[in-house]
Image (spheres, grey):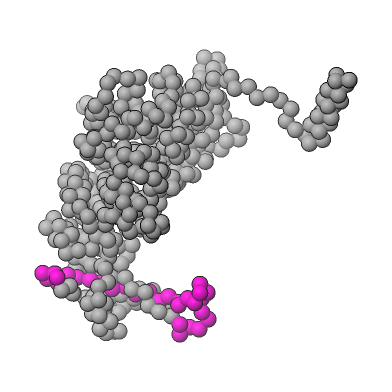
Amino acid sequence: MAKKIKKNRKKEIKKIIKKLNLSDYEYIADDENITLSAMAPQLVDFLNALGIKKLFEEEVKIDKRKSRYSPSCLSELLILQNILGYDRIESSRTLSLDSHYQQKLGINSYPDPETFRDELQRYTPENIDQLFIVNKKLLELLAKQEEPQYIDLHMDSKVITVYGDQEKAEVGYNPQKPGRKSYHVKICTVEPFGFTFAIRVESGDSVSSTGFESFYRQCVEAIPTKHFVIKAIRLDRGFFSEDNIKLFEADYIFFEVVAKQYKSLKEFIQSIPEEDFEPFNLSETIEGASFSFSLDSWEGEREFVVVRKLIRTEDNGQRLLFDDLYTWHYQVICHNNLDMSPYEVWQDYNQRARIELTLKELDYDYFLTKVPTGDYLANFAYFWHSVIAYNIMLFFKRYILQGEWITKTISTLRKKLFNIPGRLVNRSGRMVMRIIKGFKEVELLNSIRDRLICFYQRLNPAPS
């Protein structure tokens, strides 16, 4: 009876399989030649050409006993798994299944998440400074690829909300999560490259001007001045103060900083005659005017540009219908370039939007806000690895992928290039990475080796 029931059940199952066209096969996890990312080996090659592991070996000295994984190896792995899209340290467990990837890296097994955490928790304040030196060396490598030129520094800050009891996380200004503990991160980028040059992680009750002078000095003094000359610095309103402005003036740097609209400044703007405003567009919905002004606490006058945009008033989120319900939205920029018109100052300052995009990409795509531990220095070190991963991808897009790929986000690269599985096979003595039929970027993948060789030769020219 039991055999008959079992037989009937098998028949019923077969009918369902046939009716639904179910995939009737068994899964076996035994193919050591399949890799999760067919392009991961080329990313490893690129890091080798860039000399990342050597940079970490030379500059970052972690105090630890000899172990299976050197500090430079773990830093390389943290950077690579960030590039490949593993948003948390725990997520990297999947890479322990990719034997081809491990073989390419020269390791017998992939570190578990606790190994990464233990490593990050060994970082000292000196090690954090050493990570800055690593990043500075990367900027020097970028200089070898580019012509000598003027550069601009853009500075901004970001609040990183934490969930838990992280060291040095405090309650401060937090527009996304009011009342939550956070870190306050300052960031400096080098334009026109979008290179993230420096970060500073502070407690959440800090503001943009907290410790700004030392952060500014660290950035300015580390720029390779034989190749790059700082022309201008652009900052948002959080950095607006006479003390900061004096720093720029002492260094003979053009600056553009959004002014906080104090009462005395607002009253002065209201007194500017209408005829002093010049239109920036044909519809005359954006206008600007120049003026000199000194706040009560300042030692002297500075130059300002006020820009006003005509916007519709809104009622409960709905735009009103009548044209007379428009209002002016004001932005005030303090600057020291007397040769520029109000329109030129406004246009020039708008270049700072690039750093806002950089911060957004660091947040969403390089996981800058994924706080991994409860220790302040460990988290600072993790953030630095995210930044270095971001800069490495700037190199990779600019000098290896080139063309339209330069403007692509890492999210697009992961979807279209990086996270494509492959199977390594030996075909008549030549190793071939087989990927899905019809993959349209196959020629790009085949060209990368030669581009890597040219890139390496530019970084390491043969002696004449």
Asked if residue 319 is among those painted magenta in the image, a careful observer would answer yes
Looking at the rendering, the stretch of residues picked out in magenta corresponds to 297-325
317 vs 216, left or right, is right
Front residue of 268/419: it is 268
Q: Quadrant of the C terminus?
A: top left
In this rendering, is residue 5 above or below 355? above
Picture layout, residue 304 above or below residue 353: below
- Left or right side of 249 for 183: right
Identified at 14% across, 70% down, the residue is 297
Residue 4: % across, % down: 88, 21
Image coordinates of residue 234 in percent, x first then y, are 26, 58
Q: Can the viewer see residue 124?
A: yes
Q: Is residue 72 left or right of residue 11?
A: left
Q: Residue at 15% of width from left, 61% of height from top? A: 243
Task: Please tell me which residue lies in front, 280 or 30.
Answer: 30
Q: Which quadrant would residue 453 be assigned to in this image? A: top left
Residue in view at x 22 percent, y 26 percent = 463
